[in-house]
Image (tube, rainbow, N blue to C red):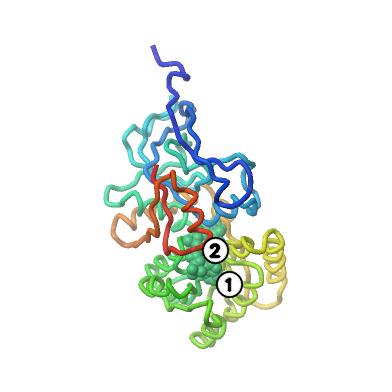
């Protein structure tokens, strides 16, 4: 006799955010996880990620975020523990990676089978996790939005962070030359990734970029937003593209800053000339979708298995220390991806 669904629940732990606020609003709760649905797979999480987007959602500042209460975590790598009755192509024991958007910061997660990809043996759990959100974002920014080829010249803001370091690593892989901003203690990380480092707190990055590239750059990747976009726009060449992929400035400036970012993007789009401005969000068409994320992640896992990518881990903390992980994101003392281990 097959077990009834209630017999197939398992004890689980997951982070929950019940209201907006600082890192202190994070709670780790214990509860039973129901069995996976017919087209789902139950994954035992090996590692999951903390991203700046999780911080903005926790503060209630990201448009389109899930309603409270919810479990944060865009990305996970884990091992299949059991499969729903309509799933025939996955077996327990398989190591997989998935972009889930929310809900990854847990011990077990039921994941739709269509989101999973196998992780090659040569790629570690941590490396694979860096690829799921940060490298897919970076790949789609470089190749799908800006369509850059070898020889292009770009500026990446936050070059030592999770997404920024992925942009620099992939830029180097594709033969693209990068300048990158970072704070003083992270400049060496940016240099190790092959970029020309700009200490944005002590230097005027527009003046530095114009001195290095008097004709202007092919693309600038800006996740800061607000008034920062005006300076980024000034670094562009005649046919350059400003790609806005975040609004970190709204963490300090709140919703007003977010609205300013959207208004500036609209203004750039109306500015006559050949320069242009695009907005990117992972999962948002036309440059991203669940199918494109899966396709691009498969390629990135292959490149990583061939030793062609060098993902950087900034910190690895147990799930029980998630508050600390979010504090690290707020204060940005680490370079690279912040990882939670159940
Ligand atoms: N659109 C998408 O789908 C998508 C996907 C992934 C990430 N993102 C965005 O990308 C950004 C980075 O996310 P993440 O998770 O990878 O976080 P992260 O980069 O690891 O952390 C943020 C980084 O930004 C840097 N920073 C802060 N203010 C800066 C400024 N004014 N100029 C230059 N650098 C600055 C900080 O380093 P310093 O110490 O150098 O200041 C820190 O390393 C966020 O805005 C996030 O929302 C967007």
Q: Is residue 309 left or right of residue 40?
A: left
Of residues 13 and 324, the one drawn nearer to the viewer in this rendering: 324
Q: Is residue 147 visible?
A: no
Mark 1–mark 2 distance (CA, rounded to whole Å)? 9 Å
The correct choice, above or below, for 320 with respect to 193 in the image is: above
Q: Is residue 302 left or right of residue 214?
A: left
Residue 241, labelled with which disc? 1
Labels 1 and 2: the sequence-earlier one: 2
Quadrant (top left, top right, bottom left, bottom right) of the N terminus: top left
The x and y percentages for residue 120 are 30, 48
CB of mark 1 within 8 Å of CB of mark 2? yes
Q: For label 1, count other residues whose C-alpha is less than 10 Å away and answer few (under 14), some (14-19) or many (20+).
A: many
**Extreme residue toward the top, this view:** 1
Check the picture and name the quadrant holding the C terminus: top left
Indicate whether 322 appears above or below 281: above
Q: Look at 29% across and 60% down and name the residue there.
A: 307
Can you identify the residue that label 2 sits on?
145
Q: Residues within 10 Å of mark 2 (few under 14, many from 20)?
A: some
Residue 40 versus residue 274 in the image, above or below: above
């Amino acid at each position: 006799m097959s077990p009834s669904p209630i017999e197939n629940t398992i004890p689980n732990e997951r982070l929950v955010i019940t209201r907006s606020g600082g890192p202190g609003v994070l709670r780790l709760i214990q509860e039973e996880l129901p069995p996976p649905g017919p087209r789902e797979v139950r994954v035992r999480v090996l590692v999951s990620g903390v991203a700046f987007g999780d911080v903005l959602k926790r503060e209630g500042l990201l448009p389109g975020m899930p309603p409270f209460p919810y479990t944060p975590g865009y990305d996970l790598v884990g091992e299949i523990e059991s499969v729903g009755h309509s799933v025939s192509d996955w077996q327990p024991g398989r190591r997989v990676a998935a972009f889930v958007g929310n809900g990854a910061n847990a011990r077990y997660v039921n994941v739709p089978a269509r989101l999973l990809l196998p992780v090659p043996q040569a790629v570690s759990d941590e490396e694979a996790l860096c690829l799921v959100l940060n490298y897919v974002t970076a790949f789609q920014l470089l190749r799908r939005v800006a369509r850059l080829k070898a020889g292009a010249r770009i500026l990446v803001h936050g070059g030592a962070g999770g997404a920024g370091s992925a942009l620099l690593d992939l830029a180097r892989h594709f033969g693209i030359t990068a300048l990158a901003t970072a704070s003083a203690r992270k400049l060496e990380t940016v240099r190790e990734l092959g970029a020309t480092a700009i200490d944005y707190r002590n230097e005027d990055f527009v003046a530095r970029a114009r001195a290095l590239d008097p004709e202007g750059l092919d693309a600038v990747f800006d996740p800061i937003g607000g008034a920062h976009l005006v300076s980024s726009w000034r670094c562009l060449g005649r046919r350059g593209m400003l790609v806005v992929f975040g609004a970190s400035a709204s963490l300090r400036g709140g919703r007003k800053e977010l609205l300013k970012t959207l208004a500036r993007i609209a203004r750039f789009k109306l500015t006559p000339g050949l320069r242009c401005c695009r907005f990117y969000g992972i999962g948002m068409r036309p440059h991203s979708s669940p199918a494109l994320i899966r396709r691009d992640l498969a390629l990135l896992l292959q490149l990583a298995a061939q030793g062609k990518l060098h993902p950087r881990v900034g910190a690895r903390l147990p799930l029980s220390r998630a508050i600390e992980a979010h504090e690290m994101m707020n204060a940005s003392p680490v370079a690279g991806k912040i990882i939670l281990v159940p």
